[in-house]
Image (cartoon, rainbow, N blue to C red):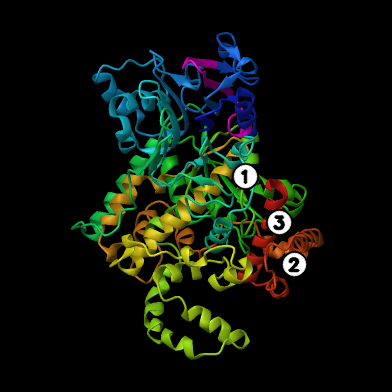
């Protein structure tokens, strides 16, 4: 896990100092090492070091301060996890200098691929997964991503073809942003690095902001910044440096609508158990200590049990807010499971004052508005100080296995949908009728999906943005879900709009704020593909959430863990807002400042504020608060 950045300039070369500023902006992603590659006007590649580069690299390269002008630059920050030696330094050059790599992520099947490449005649100088990507590209070219199991975002310069290859993993676990204009492309793991380039102008993308308000995160390729996009999950870009042509292609699609496996429930449970054990074994690979983020819920607790089964000396971590389990946390259940597993357990209880003192800086780290504040920031800070670099995370279970209430309630929605046409005869007078009309407008699965979230409603966004965005495009027709059953369509939307666009994006920023890598066994792409082939009655039974995963979990965790009501793992900001004048004053001030800007119609804001004790209104209030923080920080 690292941070990468770079640029291609088709016309006038840029000063290397720009690349240095970009790399410094993502220093938190990789405090262990720093490196650069530059391509001068005569097509000569240069390898340079920075202030934080390791001694071995400084002894063999020039300082980036002497880099001069360049038409292509790669910047890198390293978080050493696999092959901690100097040999794992990046940018990584092939033996003949024809290819250069910067890579962020982990390749879990790198050992198998390494053997295959060695059999094909490739020689390895390191024990890293990075070199597997480098040689893999030389062997398979554009097809390389299809061979990789893992989370990744990488850039490869191909000196023979005079091209740059940019790739993002299938699910979108690793972020990859870029700015594009007629003079070139600029990319990075985080937008804050792209903003360091003087040719990148800071302005609002209202279409991306509208997407953020609806989905709680801008759906790829949109961002809230004009002309800054994200490479969609499962896609790549190739930049031809001679012509300036940019080719884009997706190598993976969310697997829906395919043939079903003929398998019994009992065999599916056994097969899932075996798959999870294998995935955990693969994702535990590291040359540094690995821990787990165990909330006490089904997903993370089951993974922790599997980790401890394979590694008896395994450590876990749990975060709580009051330690009683009566509020947002599941700490008592997590503590009980740690005792049952007989593992070392780090318990961390957060108090409001810990958050308040760093509230604005924490919100500023994120590069778009959001409806809450990530508890993971406190967790990643704690674990970093404890010496950890890698965390097994249970995120993905709800999306892959059907964990949200809308998987249980969709049949009722389908029944009610028959009366939805009467909404055109109802006057939008009073709160009840307005809500009824709003609900009866959810006449597609995508509208049903977005309505179930705590983000802003379609009509509210249209009113707020005053024509500055095409709100009709926020709910596009998607041929991939045509003719699918409702739960299968929800599975598709969860992966498209909630995992890569929201959950793992925020998780990445959260962990890497303190140089911590998150790994997600439940988002293994081969697992997702297998689950998608299962008969629907095994995946969804209409009675309990995640029925298949629960069957496997019952072998490893207690009945109490299995029977707990679902809780969102987030800070109790809503309660704190009611009880703490500092947080309330902060929120009120930010909304007032946002009003003064005059860029949004905030006629609904006072109504939401009056009802901020209700979750649905609090989330809208906090999204406005974080919108103002985002505007102050980045624009």
Left or right: where 398 falls relative to 464: left
Q: Earlier in the sequence, mark 2 or mark 1?
A: 1
**Residue 628's mark?**
3
Of circles 3 and 2, the one toward us is 3
Q: Residue at x 37, y 59 (%)?
A: 492
Q: Residue at x 36, y 29 (%)?
A: 110
Q: Residue at x 45, y 70 (%)?
A: 447
Residue 184, position in %: x, y?
51, 34
Report, in whole angstroms, how far the alpha carbon at label 1 lies from the one at label 3: 25 Å
Q: Nearer the viewer, residue 23 or 279?
A: 23
Residue 55, position in %: x, y?
60, 13
Q: Is residue 127 above or below residue 243?
A: above
Residue receiving disc 2: 578
Q: Secondary structure at mark 3?
A: helix
Marks 2,1: beta carbons within 8 A: no
Q: Earlier in the sequence, mark 3 or mark 2?
A: 2
Residue 251, position in %: x, y?
32, 43
**Residue 379's mark?**
1
Segment colored magenta: 26-47
Q: Classify residue 482 by image quadrant.
A: bottom left
Pick out the residue farthest to the left: 262
Residue 590, position in %: x, y?
75, 59
Left or right: where 28 falls relative to 152: right
Q: Is residue 611 visible?
A: yes
Report, in whole angstroms, how far the alpha carbon at label 3 lies from the one at label 2: 20 Å
Asked if residue 309 lies in the magenta stretch, the reply is no
């Amino acid at each position: 896990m690292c941070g990468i950045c770079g640029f291609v300039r088709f016309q006038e070369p840029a000063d290397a100092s720009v690349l240095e500023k970009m790399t410094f902006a993502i220093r938190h992603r990789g405090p262990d090492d720093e490196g650069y590659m530059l391509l001068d006007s005569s097509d000569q590649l240069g390898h340079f070091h920075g202030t934080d580069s390791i001694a071995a690299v400084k002894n063999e390269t020039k300082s980036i301060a002497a880099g001069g002008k360049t038409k292509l630059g790669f910047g890198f920050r390293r978080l050493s996890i696999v092959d901690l030696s100097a040999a794992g330094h990046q940018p990584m050059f092939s033996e003949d200098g024809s290819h250069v790599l910067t890579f962020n992520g982990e390749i879990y099947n790198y050992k198998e691929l390494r053997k295959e490449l060695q059999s094909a005649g490739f020689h390895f100088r390191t024990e890293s997964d990075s070199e597997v990507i480098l040689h893999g590209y030389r062997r398979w070219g554009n097809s390389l991503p299809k061979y990789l199991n893992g989370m990744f975002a990488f850039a490869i310069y191909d000196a023979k073809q005079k091209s740059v290859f940019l790739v993002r993993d299938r699910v979108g676990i690793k972020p990859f942003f870029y700015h594009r204009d007629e003079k070139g492309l600029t990319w990075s793991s985080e937008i804050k690095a792209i903003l360091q380039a003087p040719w990148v102008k800071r302005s609002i993308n209202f279409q991306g902001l509208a997407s953020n308000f609806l989905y709680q995160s801008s759906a790829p390729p949109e961002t809230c910044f004009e002309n800054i996009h994200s490479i969609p999950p499962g896609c790549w870009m190739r930049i031809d440096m001679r012509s300036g042509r940019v080719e884009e292609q997706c190598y993976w699609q969310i697997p829906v609508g395919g043939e079903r496996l003929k398998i019994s429930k009992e065999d599916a449970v056994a097969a899932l158990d075996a798959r999870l054990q294998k995935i955990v074994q693969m994702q535990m690979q590291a040359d540094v200590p690995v821990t787990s983020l165990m909330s006490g819920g089904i997903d993370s607790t089951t993974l922790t049990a599997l980790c401890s089964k394979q590694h008896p000396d395994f450590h876990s971590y749990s975060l709580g807010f009051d330690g009683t389990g009566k509020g947002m946390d599941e700490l008592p259940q997590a503590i009980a499971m740690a005792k049952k597993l007989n593992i070392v357990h780090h318990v961390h209880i957060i108090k409001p004052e810990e958050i308040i003192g760093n509230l604005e800086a924490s919100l500023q780290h994120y590069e778009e508005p959001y409806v809450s504040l990530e508890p993971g920031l406190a967790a990643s800070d704690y674990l970093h100080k404890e010496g950890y670099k890698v965390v097994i995370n249970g995120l993905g279970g709800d999306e892959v296995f059907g964990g949200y209430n809308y998987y249980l309630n969709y049949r009722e929605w389908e029944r009610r949908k028959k009366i939805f046409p009467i909404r055109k005869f109802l006057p939008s007078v009073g709160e009840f009728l307005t809500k009824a009309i709003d609900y009866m407008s959810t006449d597609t699965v995508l509208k049903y999906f977005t309505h179930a979230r705590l983000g802003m409603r379609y009509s509210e966004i249209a009113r707020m943005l005053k024509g500055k965005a095409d709100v009709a495009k926020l709910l596009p027709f998607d041929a991939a879900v045509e003719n699918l059953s409702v739960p299968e369509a929800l599975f598709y939307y969860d992966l498209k709009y909630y995992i890569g666009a929201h959950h793992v994006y925020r998780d990445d920023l959260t962990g890497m704020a303190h140089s911590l890598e998150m790994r997600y066994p439940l988002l293994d792409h081969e697992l997702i593909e297998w689950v998608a082939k299962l008969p629907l009655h095994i995946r969804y039974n209409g009675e309990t959430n995640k029925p298949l995963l629960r069957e496997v979990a019952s072998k490893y965790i207690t009945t109490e863990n299995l029977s707990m009501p679902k809780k969102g793992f987030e800070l109790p900001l809503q309660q704190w807002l009611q009880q703490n004048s500092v947080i309330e004053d902060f929120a009120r001030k930010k909304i007032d400042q946002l009003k003064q800007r005059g860029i949004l119609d905030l006629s609904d804001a006072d109504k939401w504020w009056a009802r901020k004790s209700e979750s649905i209104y609090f989330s809208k209030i906090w999204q406005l608060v974080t919108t103002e923080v985002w505007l102050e920080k980045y624009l």
